[in-house]
Image (cartoon, rainbow, N blue to C red):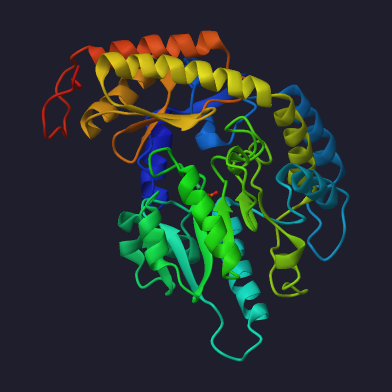
Amino acid sequence: MSLAAVMRAESQFLLPTYDRNPVLFTRGRGVYLYDSKGKRYLDFLSGIGVNALGYGHPAIKKVLSRQSQKLIHVSNLFFHEYQAELAKLLTRMSGLDRAFFCNSGTEAWEGALKLARAYAHAQNHNGHKAKWRMLALDNSFHGRTFGSLATTGQSKYRVPFAPLMPGVSFVTLNDTADLKRQFDGSVCAVCLETVQGEGGIRPVSSEFLQLARELTAKHGALLVIDEIQCGLGRTGRHFAYQHYGIQPDIVTVAKPLAAGLPLGAILTSNKVASCMHPGMHGTTFGGGPLSCSVAVEFLKQAEKRLGHISRMGAYFREQLESLAGRHGGEVRGMGLMLAWALDSPDLAKAVVRTLLKRGILINRTNETALRFLPPYIIEKGHIDLLIRELDRAVGEPGPPLKNSKSGTRRSKA
Ligand SMILES: Cc1ncc(COP(=O)(O)O)c(C=O)c1O
């Protein structure tokens, strides 16, 4: 089918939830994607952080092919070999004790919220109302289901679906005074992304995270950390919170975990896990043998690349800083999770579009931030090419944008 035919069919048969770019991808190899006309695209987005080993990785293909011929699904009523193996790897990497497997980021986050509430109920020995409030962060993003939406601090995602789950208050990112003001004995969990992804690539400050850890530990609440976008090697460590020297009570992961197959996980301590019993939580598809066996291989491959991720991340950041020095804007992020926040949404939109035409995939988040989530196999030459194209795209005046309010595409020099 041609791009035009697919666009026509989608516009007739799909819910209009996506504003897709007009490109029909048909295959991928390494750091490149190819469209239906054979045009090659250098991928600095990795399917929003999912294709972290790029496309067609030989070790992943091997496990996929072997396992797909043996067993794809079995249900959680029975055992298969790979959940425990995967949990063992994830617990070793995270310093936590136990895992639960599900299908997506939002499902992992929902489960984490349920776990926090269940733990609060189990701790409530005095017959009073159990701790129940949750503190989440302004500008955060945790997914599209109701609990995730309720803890997502961006009203554009929440408002159309109100009323949401009650009991959530939002604290300003990195505002320790606000966190102290809003924290009290009714709080069962402080919930945050170590690096806000959809919120524009904004790392939590060390001071704020330490305070969240101290307050929760002191008052019997839980620190619940969303590493769905920033975890599993993306920042050069297994988990981004490991840069801060703290240990959370609950962590969620998903995106790259099964190298493109849907798989999410909740990780937690024995202390928290002790509140769960058979029947309290579950899923039909989550943690099947195909996705879990692929995830075991993904984690082994990603672990080997942590040094490379840190080196490439540092180099990439340096290059972006020099662009920002010339054109303005701010560079944010950690490892290979980076953003260059420009001065205007129109400029950011135009740059994404220009790069797409020139065969480079990035995207824009939080209006002005150019977001970069390249695969972990990216090399300096790829970064250099992107930097040259960004320099050109930001520096050159283009035709006025259709929906441009300001009518300008130049950033402040
Ligand atoms: C930090 C974070 N949490 C949760 C989610 C939701 O994940 P999913 O889209 O797999 O439900 C996302 C997705 O972008 C995310 O970035």
Residue 347 in view, yes or no: yes
Q: Residue furthest bottom?
A: 127
Query: Which x, y percent locates residue 220?
Result: 60, 70
Q: Residue at x 48, y 18 (%)?
A: 316
Position above or below: 342 against 175: above
Q: Is residue 214 left or right of residue 341?
A: right
Query: Which x, y percent locates residue 166?
Result: 42, 75
Position above or below: 186 against 80: below
Query: Which x, y percent locates residue 206?
Result: 50, 43
Choose top left, top right, bottom left or bottom right for residue 221.
bottom right
168 or 376: nearer the eye? 168
387 or 361: nearer the eye? 387
Position above or below: 182 against 137: below
Q: Residue at x 26, y 21 (%)?
A: 328
Query: Which x, y percent locates residue 266?
Result: 66, 56
Q: Is residue 232 left or right of residue 61?
A: left
Residue 33 in view, yes or no: no
Position above or below: 284 against 60: below
8 or 141: nearer the eye? 141
Q: Residue at x 57, y 32 (%)?
A: 235
The tally of labels here is 0
Q: Is residue 76 left or right of residue 7?
A: right
386 or 358: nearer the eye? 386
Q: Is residue 368 left or right of residue 214?
A: left
Q: Quadrant of the C terminus?
A: top left
